[in-house]
Image (tube, rainbow, N blue to C red):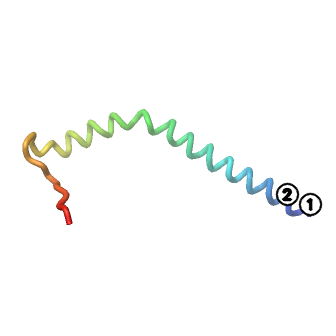
Amino acid sequence: MVGLAGQAEVSRQIAHAHVLFNVAGVLVFAPLVPLCQRLLDAWLPDQGVGKQAFQVQPV
Protein backbone atom coordinates (compact mmCIF):
# COMPACT_ATOMS: atom_id res chain seq x y z
CA MET A 1 0.00 0.00 0.00
CA VAL A 2 2.92 2.35 0.59
CA GLY A 3 3.83 2.23 -3.10
CA LEU A 4 0.32 3.23 -4.13
CA ALA A 5 0.34 6.26 -1.84
CA GLY A 6 3.59 7.46 -3.41
CA GLN A 7 2.17 7.03 -6.89
CA ALA A 8 -0.90 9.07 -5.97
CA GLU A 9 1.37 11.87 -4.73
CA VAL A 10 3.28 11.90 -8.02
CA SER A 11 0.03 12.00 -9.97
CA ARG A 12 -1.20 14.89 -7.86
CA GLN A 13 2.05 16.81 -8.44
CA ILE A 14 1.75 16.27 -12.19
CA ALA A 15 -1.84 17.52 -12.13
CA HIS A 16 -0.85 20.61 -10.12
CA ALA A 17 2.02 21.37 -12.50
CA HIS A 18 -0.34 21.04 -15.45
CA VAL A 19 -2.85 23.45 -13.89
CA LEU A 20 -0.12 25.97 -13.05
CA PHE A 21 1.22 25.75 -16.61
CA ASN A 22 -2.24 26.44 -18.04
CA VAL A 23 -2.87 29.36 -15.66
CA ALA A 24 0.52 30.86 -16.51
CA GLY A 25 -0.27 30.57 -20.22
CA VAL A 26 -3.54 32.42 -19.75
CA LEU A 27 -1.84 35.15 -17.71
CA VAL A 28 0.80 35.61 -20.41
CA PHE A 29 -1.44 35.54 -23.48
CA ALA A 30 -4.68 37.15 -22.24
CA PRO A 31 -3.27 40.71 -22.47
CA LEU A 32 -2.33 40.00 -26.10
CA VAL A 33 -5.91 39.32 -27.20
CA PRO A 34 -6.71 42.99 -28.09
CA LEU A 35 -3.53 43.16 -30.18
CA CYS A 36 -4.52 39.99 -32.03
CA GLN A 37 -7.99 41.43 -32.58
CA ARG A 38 -6.56 44.60 -34.11
CA LEU A 39 -4.25 42.59 -36.37
CA LEU A 40 -7.09 40.37 -37.56
CA ASP A 41 -9.32 43.40 -38.14
CA ALA A 42 -6.57 44.93 -40.28
CA TRP A 43 -5.95 41.73 -42.24
CA LEU A 44 -9.62 40.75 -42.64
CA PRO A 45 -11.69 43.90 -43.06
CA ASP A 46 -15.44 43.92 -42.50
CA GLN A 47 -17.51 42.83 -45.52
CA GLY A 48 -19.90 45.75 -45.18
CA VAL A 49 -22.65 46.91 -42.88
CA GLY A 50 -25.61 45.54 -44.83
CA LYS A 51 -23.97 42.50 -46.36
CA GLN A 52 -23.64 39.31 -44.34
CA ALA A 53 -20.73 37.09 -45.24
CA PHE A 54 -22.35 34.00 -43.69
CA GLN A 55 -25.97 33.08 -43.16
CA VAL A 56 -27.40 30.02 -41.45
CA GLN A 57 -30.03 28.33 -43.57
CA PRO A 58 -32.87 26.63 -41.70
CA VAL A 59 -33.31 22.93 -42.40
Does 33 sit left or right of 40 as displayed? right
Q: Residue furthest bottom?
A: 59
Rendering quarter of residue 59: bottom left
Vertical comparison of 11 with 27: above or below = below
Dot 1: within a 10 Å radius of its alpha carbon, few (fewer than 14), some, or many (20 or more) residues?
few
Give above or below for 37 relative to 1.
above
Identified at 15% across, 42% down, the residue is: 46
Q: List x then y, in percent, for residue 25.
A: 52, 42
Residue 9 place in picture, x, y as percent: 80, 53
Numbered circle sitting on residue 6:
2
Identify which amino acid the numbered label 2 is placed on: Gly
Q: Nearer the viewer, residue 28 or 46?
A: 46
Residue 55: x %, y % from top left: 16, 55
Q: Which residue: 39% across, 36% down? A: 32
Residue 56, labelled with which disc?
none
| Above/below status of 15 relative to 1 | above
- Secondary structure of the residue carrying numbered label 1: helix
Going by the numbered disc 1, the residue's amino acid type is Val
Residue 23 occupies quadrant: top right
Q: Which quadrant of the rendered structure holds the N terminus?
A: bottom right
Q: At which x and y percent is residue 49?
A: 10, 40
Q: Find the distance from the CA under tag 1 to the CA under tag 2.
A: 7 Å
Mark 1 vs 2: CB contact within 8 A: yes
Give the residue number, with chain letter if any, for mark 1. 2
